[in-house]
Image: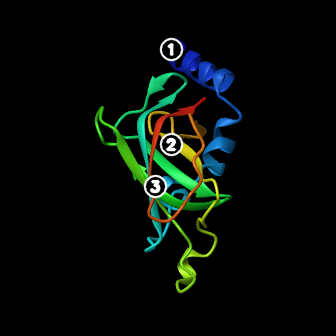
Amino acid sequence: MKKIYLFVLLFICCDDPNQSDQQENFIPIEEYFIYNESNMIAFYFFENITIGGVEIDSLDWVAAFNGQVCVGAKQWNCGSQTCDIAVYGENTLNDLTIGYMQSGQLPSFKVYDHSDSTYYDAQPSEEILWNNGDFNQIEALIAN
């Protein structure tokens, strides 16, 4: 009987009161990293992507945004090779791409860490403006 009482006491004392708030506010990746494809497209190739200095793994995701609009996303199952993310642009003939990239705009990036279900803002080692048809090589994408 003492063991059960101790377990209940530890559970009550050590419960994180913010944990339920974090779970309630969490947006599933299927909803947050959703986008439509467009015939306007540029590719951003990254040699390595890290979170706090540790390389991401094959269950993690990388997404590009134009403001609050997701304009491309990819699960990072590229192994240790350079990998790309397609970043889509606005096509005036397609209402599904309103708010997507336009020439001369700078995409922002986010990384989803599967191991702790956390989204991180990520900074590229160099900023390259979006232009339709471009293939952009960037050394690193760093999330902290």
The crowding category of the residue bearing disc 2, from other C-alpha atoms within 10 Å (few below 14, some 14 to 19, many at least 20), is many
Picture mark count = 3
Q: Judging from the image, what secondary structure is the residue with disc 2 in?
A: strand
The kind of residue tagged 2 is: Tyr
Q: Is residue 25 above or below residue 7?
A: below
Coloring applied to the structure:
rainbow
The crowding category of the residue bearing disc 3, from other C-alpha atoms within 10 Å (few below 14, some 14 to 19, many at least 20), is many
Q: Judging from the image, what secondary structure is the residue with disc 3 in?
A: strand
Which labelled disc corresponds to residue 73?
A: 3
Q: Which of marks 1 and 2 is nearer the N terminus?
A: 1
Q: Where is residue 114 in the image (x, y as percent from the top left)?
A: 44, 39
Disc 1 + disc 2, Cβ < 8 Å: no
Residues 134 and 98: in front is 134
C-alpha span from label 1 to label 2: 39 Å
Q: Earlier in the sequence, mark 1 or mark 3?
A: 1
Q: Where is residue 44 in the image (x, y as percent from the top left)?
A: 45, 49
C-alpha span from label 1 to label 3: 48 Å
Q: Earlier in the sequence, mark 2 or mark 3?
A: 3
Identify the residue shown where x is 51% and y is 51%: 63
Q: Mark 1 points at which residue?
A: 3
Which labelled disc corresponds to residue 112?
A: 2
Q: Which residue lies furthest to the bottom in this view?
A: 93
Which labelled disc corresponds to residue 134?
A: none
Q: Does residue 79 appear to the left or right of 18 in the view shown? A: left
Q: Position of residue 42 (x, y in %)?
A: 46, 60
Q: Judging from the image, what secondary structure is the residue with disc 1 in?
A: helix
